Amino acid sequence: MTQTALVVGASGIIGSATADLLTRDGWIVHGLARRPVEQTGVHPVPVDLQDAEATASALNGLQPDAVFITTWARQSSEKENIRVNAGMVRNLLDALRPSGSVRHVALVTGLKHYLGPFEAYGKGSLPETPFRETQERLDVANFYYAQEDEVFAAARQDGFTWSVHRPHTVIGKAVGNAMNMGTTLAVYATLCRETGRPFRFPGSAAQWNGLTDMTDAGQLARHLVWAATTPAAANEAFNVVNGDVFRWSWMWGRIADWFGLAPAPFDGTILPLEKQMQDDAAVWQRIAERDGLVEPDLSRLASPWHTDADLGRPIEVVTDMSKSRRLGFLDYRATDDAFFDLFQRLRSDRLIP
């Protein structure tokens, strides 16, 4: 029997990868986004989840078996993040309730579950690494916790199972995405090559020297579908990363080599990309016009604030995946390959020269 999925945030890095996997696996896929992009085999559902009435109208008659929530809306404070993002989850699940069709809801959050919200990111008393799902919530307001609570409340009311997925920094393709390290680094490398500026690691010594991991969007998509279709994974929270670990002192050189650059020596000084790239919009537009790129707007490709937050952390960040392994999820993705495949895709799609 063919299953039906609703992917929420289908135009984003995670949502587009999940929708693509589901269509290839034979699911009927509906892709919800404020501004849907064309995706083969995906039925677009254009709606703003902040509007409860519009959400109910857009989802009327839809009967998904599984719902994959892969979106959030950045606000000016954590208080507003909680109000808006918890409200979006609530509006979504309220709108789906009349159909009675939902068997499973998968919610994507992330490592801010352990590190705290952006206002207190990586500060205060934090769990020891590697992060494990058994570690308690931090005693701080966090919109991830509020989103979880909305899913848990609806599950109690409606009887569906749930899963929560906590990736590290996600590598994948999307344009106009708020958190996009892979494309940001590709654009930064291109700008360094164009201007002759040194390709300098922008982050902290702790990140340069410490072990870390990341999450490929395809790996996360496989994990989402696995949890939605594996009874033993029901009603559980999971970390999800690629399965390898690395140091940025090694990875930075690998990325530099791909772009034909020499990596600049790292002296321990934090040089945020947001500052380094603040005057680069005109340079990028010139590159785009000269090389026939499809996106001349630098702000639609790069999210330096988010890359700075991740690479500037003062602590080691590495994640344990034993829980998923014990339940049978054994997929693996080498992180350097994930970067290189993304860079090649960006080049093939004429987003970078």
Image (tube, rainbow, N blue to C red):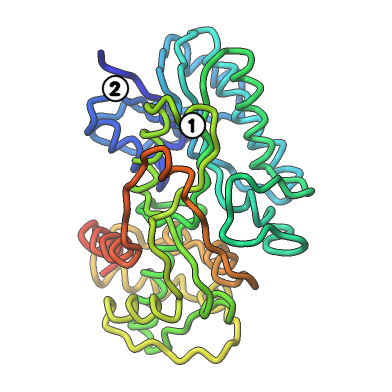
**Residue under the image location 28 percent in, 38 percent down:** 20
Q: Secondary structure at mark 1?
A: strand
According to the image, label 2 marks what residue?
A: 28
Q: Which mark is residue 106?
A: 1
Q: Amino acid at mark 2?
A: Ile
Q: Position of residue 123 (x, y in %)?
A: 73, 64
In this rendering, the answer to whether 269 lies above or below 151 is below
Res. 253 image quadrant:
bottom left
Q: Amino acid at mark 1?
A: Ala
Q: In screen coordinates, is 205 left or right of 254?
A: right
Q: Position of residue 255 (x, y in %)?
A: 34, 75
In this rendering, the answer to whether 165 lies above or below 170 is above
Q: Nearer the viewer, residue 160 or 41?
A: 160
Q: In screen coordinates, is 204 left or right of 176?
A: right
**Residue under the image location 47 percent in, 16 percent down:** 102
Q: Nearer the viewer, residue 133 or 255?
A: 133
Which residue extends farthest front? 326
In this rendering, the answer to whether 29 lies above or below 11 is above
Mark 2 and mark 1 in contact (Cβ < 8 Å)?
Answer: no
**Residue under the image location 60 percent in, 81 percent down:** 270
Of mark 1 and mark 2, the one earlier in the sequence is 2
Q: Nearer the viewer, mark 1 or mark 2?
A: 1
Q: Position of residue 228 (x, y in %)?
A: 41, 28
Q: Which mark is residue 47?
A: none
In this rendering, the answer to whether 126 lies above or below 46 is below
As measured in the structure, the alpha-carbon distance from the residue carrying label 1 to the one carrying label 2 is 17 Å
Q: Position of residue 231 (x, y in %)?
A: 42, 24
Q: Secondary structure at mark 2?
A: strand
The image quadrant where one finds the N terminus is: top left
Q: Quick one: label 2, few (<14), some, or many (20+) residues within 10 Å?
A: some
